[in-house]
Amino acid sequence: MKFKARDKYFDLSTKPLIMGILNITPDSFSDGGKFYDPDKAILQCEKMIAEGADIIDIGGESSRPGSEPVSREEELDRIMSILRPLRERFNVCISVDTYKPEVAKAALGEGADMINDIFGTENDRDLFKTAASYSAGLCIMHIKGSPLNMQSTTDYGDIITEIKNSLESSTASALECGVSSDSIVIDPGIGFGKDIEGNLKILNNLDRFAEIGRPLLIGTSRKSFIGMISGSDTSDRLSGTIASNIIALIKGASIFRVHDIKENKQAIELACRILNT
């Protein structure tokens, strides 16, 4: 399966992709404030690229449970402080984690390659059209509710079918808006309006989402369901993250959104080698 984000082309049948997380926020759940300073953020980008990140995902608004939105001006200020120097220095695929069409347009205008939309299943046609106009990559994620209230809306009748239907509907909408099929990635949204059992069920049934026929992105890195099972705090969830990513790989995921590049990349590459032998 191929994935295209502007002039970046990836053959996912031969190599999964590692997406490095860069939160330019004071309040993200794991690294809030750690890379708020632009110089520290650029150093972190350099580190992630050196360790093998294929994509850098820049976020200017926290989506942790309970977080409130920021203005598009504030989000843009945060993102642009990193996007411009990163684009000047590196040819890495740059993703911007936003659901605001105005922010997406400005970021793509500055050279971003991809939009990672946490509200992807809201069928935001304006954002889809913006991505299409730049031939950008687009990640469509499922969320129930909003970051402010999503963990109080975790009830589903059939969680797998409901999420799959939403992702299929949004994929069709994106195609109608002109987004190329090979530029669309889907993400079932681990932790976004799901309780612990829901997250585990999603991971164990990822092959159902793979049936949609688009690359499957998974973001489990350091998330709370790992801590609930292991009793570990946020800074001590690497082993659980790797375990969940290996299961996701076996079940059909091909893009992994993580904080710890080197360790996850090594584990995923080894697992791929074993599975393909």
Image (cartoon, rainbow, N blue to C red):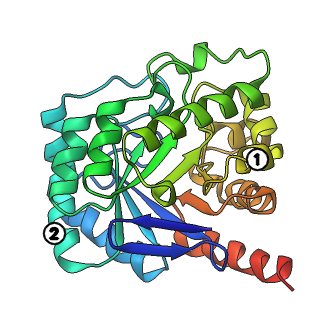
Image: 240 above or below 196: below
> Which quadrant does the N terminus fall into?
bottom right
Residue 32: x, y in percent?
A: 37, 44
Judge by depth and name the residue closer to the eye, 232 or 53: 53
The residue beneath circle 2 is 85
Task: In the rendered structure, find residue 216 and report the number of the disc placed on it.
Answer: none
x, y percent for residue 115: 36, 50
Residue type indicated by callout 2:
Pro
Label 1, secondary structure: give it. Answer: helix
| In the depicted structure, whether residue 254 falls above or below residue 102 | below
Q: Amino acid at mark 1?
A: Leu
Would you call the spot at circle 2 few (<14 residues within 10 Å), some (14-19), or many (20 or more)?
A: few
Q: Foreground: 17 or 2?
A: 2
Of residues 43 and 120, the one drawn nearer to the viewer in this rendering: 120
- Considering the image in quadrants, where does the C terminus appear? bottom right
Alpha carbon distance from label 2 to label 1:
36 Å
- Snapshot quadrant of residue 273: bottom right
**x, y percentage for residue 262?**
56, 75
Would residue 43 be found to the left or right of residue 8 on screen?
left
In the picture, the disc for residue 206 is 1
Q: Dot 1, crowdedness within 10 Å: few (<14), some or many (≥20)?
A: many
Q: Which circle's residue, 2 or 1, is located before the other in the chain?
A: 2
Q: Would you identify the image quadrant in which residue 94 lies?
A: bottom left
Mark 2 or mark 1: which is in front? 1
Task: Specify whether 213 is left or right of 86.
Answer: right
- Look at 31% across and 48% down and name the residue there: 131
Answer whether labels 2 and 1 touch (C-beta < 8 Å): no
Q: Is residue 1 visible?
A: yes
Q: Residue at x 49, y 63 (%)?
A: 19
